[in-house]
Image (cartoon, coloured by chain):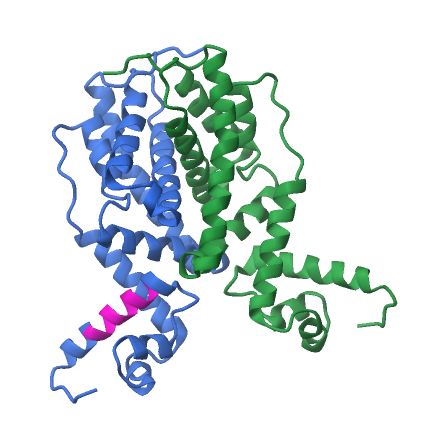
Chain colours: A blue, B green
Amino acid sequence: MPARGDHDARRRDLSEAVWRVVAEQGFTGLTMRAVAAEMDASTGLVTHYFPSKAALVRHALELAAERVDTMERHVPSAPGLAGLRAAILDVVPVDPERVAMNRVWVSSWDLALADPTLGEAQRERYDRWRARLRGHVEAAVARGELPDGADVDDVAVSAAAFTHGLVTQALFDPAAFPVARLEGLVAGFVEGLGSQNPNPS
Amino acid sequence: MPARGDHDARRRDLSEAVWRVVAEQGFTGLTMRAVAAEMDASTGLVTHYFPSKAALVRHALELAAERVDTMERHVPSAPGLAGLRAAILDVVPVDPERVAMNRVWVSSWDLALADPTLGEAQRERYDRWRARLRGHVEAAVARGELPDGADVDDVAVSAAAFTHGLVTQALFDPAAFPVARLEGLVAGFVEGLGSQNPNPS
């Protein structure tokens, strides 16, 4: 690798390489050697910035969190159920960026289920995500799109559940889940919430 | 480890140890050393049966598939939506066996997303599972529990999605998802399908 004056630029190249490796090869495949190969550099350069596998993993998870925070989001036509639909579409793999992000998050669950600190971080992420979804559900109730007695916590859990389960199915079978189908499934789920009788049997 | 005449018994002990390790420590934690420690044996014994990490992984996935095939299943009170509810309850982590099974499957996605053969196996598992769910959905349509025009494929995808997304939330936060809550959420999801107006807006 040619010498570079710019430490930040090199760090950015490294981050990009870490991201591509973990999106393609998962956390099992995230090794010094794979990152070095991805950027056509020596493993020595990688270990200079990331002295251990744990440091690589930490950095990949930081990148994933950063990308979630900075990604472009769908703009709902209205609050309430339209907002809920937009929030779900923000997460499903409708473009290459969201495919990569989901691959990284889903892959991280292997480590997170076994590591109490990572597991707690994932639990908190779920809490925050459900709270955001609940905001849309509460708006839908206020707008009369959902019945007054709707359990907003349960609807938020169900929406998060539907979303992540759709993500995993789509990641393993992209051909069966083109964007139009994903959008249709999301619209159908949200419409289904809105069209339920207030007093189901 | 004391000598044993019984090759099958030792193999069973090894399988149990592999299962416990992967359910607790994930596929990242599934190493010769961890399996040996789990059964208080030498790593030599483990490598005698499983010469590589890949062989350990393969065995853990075989065990997971076997356990899905042989697990006790919920008996529905009726076909149709009650059958769909029972099929979903078969998967959610309502007992320690299902917690372990789900931890292993969810953990396996890190490898499966990066390995074409494992990924294809996971894709086929989803196909088979959705086909089973679709059978219940078709029965529900035939019984008039769902509208005639319901897209049975979409409902099967949504049911699988809801189920797996509930699984992941529950695995990371068991305290927030005790059995009664899981059962209530599943019942709510299935009732919601049944109470939708035939022509949603």
Classify residue A46 as left or right of residue B50: left
Residue A171 against residue A118 in the figure, above or below: above
Question: In the picture, residue B2 is in which quadrant?
Answer: bottom right
Q: Which residue of the protein is positioned furthest toward the right in this rendering? A: B5
Q: Is residue B72 left or right of residue A172?
A: right
- Comparing B25 with A14, the one in front is A14
Locate residue B87, reporting x and y percent: 55, 30
Q: Measuring from the top left, give residue B180's x and y in whole percent.
A: 53, 29
Image point (16%, 89%), residue name: A3
Return the residue nearer the eye: B143 or A154: B143
Q: Which residues are magenta?
A: A13-22
Where A36 falls versus B146 (above or below)?
below
Residue at 33% across, 12% down: B198
Q: How many marks?
A: 0
Does the rendering let one see residue A110? no
Q: Quadrant of the C terminus of chain A?
A: top left
Q: Is residue A113 left or right of residue B38?
A: left
Is A21 inside the magenta-drawn segment? yes
Which image quadrant for residue B35?
A: bottom right
Residue B86 occupies quadrant: top right
Residue A39, placed above or below residue A156: below
Q: Is A15 included in the stretch rendered in magenta?
A: yes
Quadrant where the N terminus of chain A sits is bottom left
The secondary structure that most of the magenta stretch takes on is: helix
Residue B112 position, x and y percent, is 45, 56
| Res. B42 in view | yes
The residue drawn where x is 25% and y is 77% is A39
Residue B124 image offset from top left, x and y in percent? 48, 45
Q: Residue furthest front?
A: A175
